[in-house]
Image (cartoon, grey):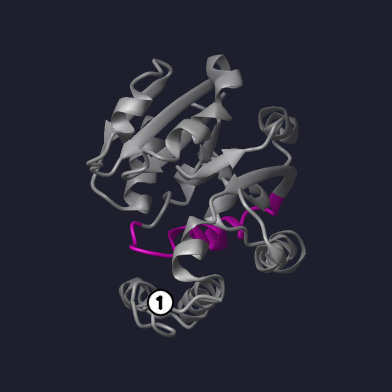
């Protein structure tokens, strides 16, 4: 069985589409949605689906994903961002992996594209498949439960929790990237500016590799002035 864990916070505009990619497999899935204190109608949307168990936890993606994992009963844990839609055939593709790989993700795709985002997609997929074997969390990371528990799950840090998890997983297994796409929203690129968002993502990764504390990385990442004024648009 696959347990799908969805951390969310004020995601009323995205959850319906995210759940839509799971509906065909409701009978084969254990779905746990973890609310970090939403103040919109996110929980009301999810309550329409009796197949989905809704729990509450402290806010923070790592904290929420660990809370969901503790209740998971499946052999495979699939961590699905609330604004990510799994492509057709995802369930069959993941099941076909069997026990040959202990962890992986799906191919990176976006809900909207343009020339800059097309370049981002190319680089992300090259990075995750051939270069660093380091997918984004947006690519719906999946991991066999026994290895997730063995390495202690997600470190409950404010940022880079998925990079940290993958670093530890790579000590045990090759990260398998499935051909099926996971479509993530480009809303952050649109709101922040395409180039600005890309620079912030790269900066966070570089700082993390230089052992900068997650708290300092988050402060830089969330700064309205880095790397330039927020109203800049490419």
Q: Which of 7 and 184 is in front in this view?
A: 184
Q: Nearer the viewer, residue 48 or 104?
A: 48
- 3 relative position to 42: left or right: right
- 185 relative position to 50: left or right: right
Q: Does the magenta stretch include residue 167?
A: yes
Image coords of residue 62 (percent x, y): 37, 52
Is 218 placed above or below 188 here? below
Is 204 placed above or below 82 here? below
Q: Nearer the viewer, residue 138 or 133?
A: 138
Q: Is mark 1 on a helix, strand or loop?
A: loop
Residue drawn at point x = 57 percent, y = 58 percent: 136
Image coords of residue 156 (percent x, y): 33, 57
Q: Name the residue under label 1.
A: 231
- 76 relative position to 63: left or right: right
Is residue 73 visible in the rendered image? The answer is no
Task: Magenta stretch: give its range.
Answer: 156-176
Residue drawn at point x = 53 percent, y = 22 percent: 29
Is 25 placed above or below 215 here? above
- 186 relative position to 48: left or right: right
In which image quadrant can residue 218 be found? bottom left
Image coords of residue 164 (percent x, y): 48, 63
Dot 1, how many residues are within 10 Å of its Cα: few (below 14), some (14-19), or many (20+)?
A: few
Q: Which of 216 and 67 is in front in this view?
A: 216
């Amino acid at each position: 069985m696959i347990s799908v864990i969805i951390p969310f916070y004020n995601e009323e505009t995205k959850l319906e589409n995210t759940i839509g990619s799971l509906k065909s497999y409701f009978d084969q899935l254990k779905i746990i949605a973890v609310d970090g204190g939403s103040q919109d109608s996110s929980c009301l949307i999810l309550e329409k689906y009796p197949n989905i168990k809704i729990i509450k936890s402290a806010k923070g993606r790592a904290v929420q994903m660990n809370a969901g994992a503790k209740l998971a009963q499946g052999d495979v844990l699939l961590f699905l961002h609330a604004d990510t839609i799994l492509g057709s055939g995802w369930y069959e593709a993941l099941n076909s992996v069997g026990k040959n790989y202990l962890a992986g993700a799906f191919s990176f795709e976006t809900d909207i594209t343009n020339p800059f985002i097309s370049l981002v997609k190319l680089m992300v997929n090259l990075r995750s498949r051939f270069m660093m074997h380091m997918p984004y969390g947006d690519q719906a990371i999946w991991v066999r439960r026994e290895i997730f528990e063995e390495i202690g799950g997600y470190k409950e840090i404010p940022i880079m929790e998925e990079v940290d998890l993958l670093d530890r997983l790579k000590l045990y297994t090759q990260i398998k990237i499935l051909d099926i796409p996971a479509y993530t929203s480009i809303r952050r690129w649109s709101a922040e500016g395409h180039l600005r968002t890309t620079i912030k993502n790269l900066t966070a990764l570089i700082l993390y590799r230089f052992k900068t504390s997650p708290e300092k990385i988050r402060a830089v990442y969330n700064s309205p002035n880095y790397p330039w004024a927020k109203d800049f648009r490419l």
